[in-house]
Image: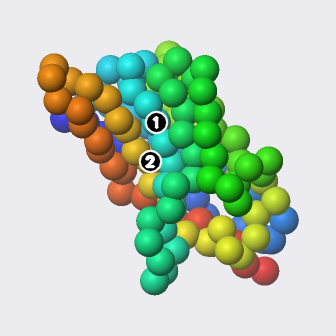
């Protein structure tokens, strides 16, 4: 059973930093592309960052470039999102996503999300 469990969210002041963590299980983590998305109230889910299976490629949403960093630890089946210089527009539920191939099927799985609130 695929499980993605996010943690590390919380309340942070504008200008502050947070590190989100996604613990994965139930699939071959080192073969999966991992990504983060976010969804603010009343808005569509938005792409935040992606890291390839071997960590050789990363990509970020336009407003995250230079402030967010995605990392992975294949030995511990974990993906991280380090967020710096946070502002209230970054308030959202942040979701971890795994994309991988199992047999002949391409699969995508989501975590339950972790709330990030940026407020003074």
102 to the left or right of 13: left
Residue at image position (35%, 35%) is: 99
Residue 59 x, y percent position in the rendering: 61, 40
Q: Nearer the viewer, residue 62 or 18?
A: 62
Placement of 86 over or under 28, stated as above or below: below
Read off the residue under disc 1. Answer: 34
What's the mark number on residue 43? Answer: none
Residue at image position (70%, 60%) is: 63
Residue 67 x, y percent position in the rendering: 77, 51
Residue at image position (37%, 38%) is: 98
- Does residue 18 appear in this view? no
Q: Quadrant of residue 15?
A: bottom right
Placement of 98 over or under 87, stated as above or below: above
6 to the left or right of 111: right
Task: State how far apart marks 2 and 1 are (Cα).
Answer: 7 Å
Q: Secondary structure at mark 1?
A: strand
What's the mark number on residue 96? Answer: 2
In the picture, which quadrant includes the N terminus?
top left
């Amino acid at each position: 059973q695929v499980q993605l469990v996010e943690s590390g969210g919380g309340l942070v002041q504008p200008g502050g930093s947070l590190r989100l963590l996604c613990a994965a299980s139930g699939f071959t983590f080192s073969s999966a592309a991992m990504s983060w998305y976010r969804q603010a109230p009343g808005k569509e889910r938005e792409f935040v960052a992606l890291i390839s299976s071997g960590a050789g490629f990363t990509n970020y949403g336009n407003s995250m470039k230079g402030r967010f960093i995605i990392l992975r630890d294949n030995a511990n089946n974990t993906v991280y999102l380090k967020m710096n210089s946070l502002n209230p527009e970054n308030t959202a539920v942040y979701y971890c996503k795994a994309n991988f191939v199992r047999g002949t099927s391409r699969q995508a799985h989501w975590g339950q999300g972790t709330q990030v609130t940026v407020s003074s």
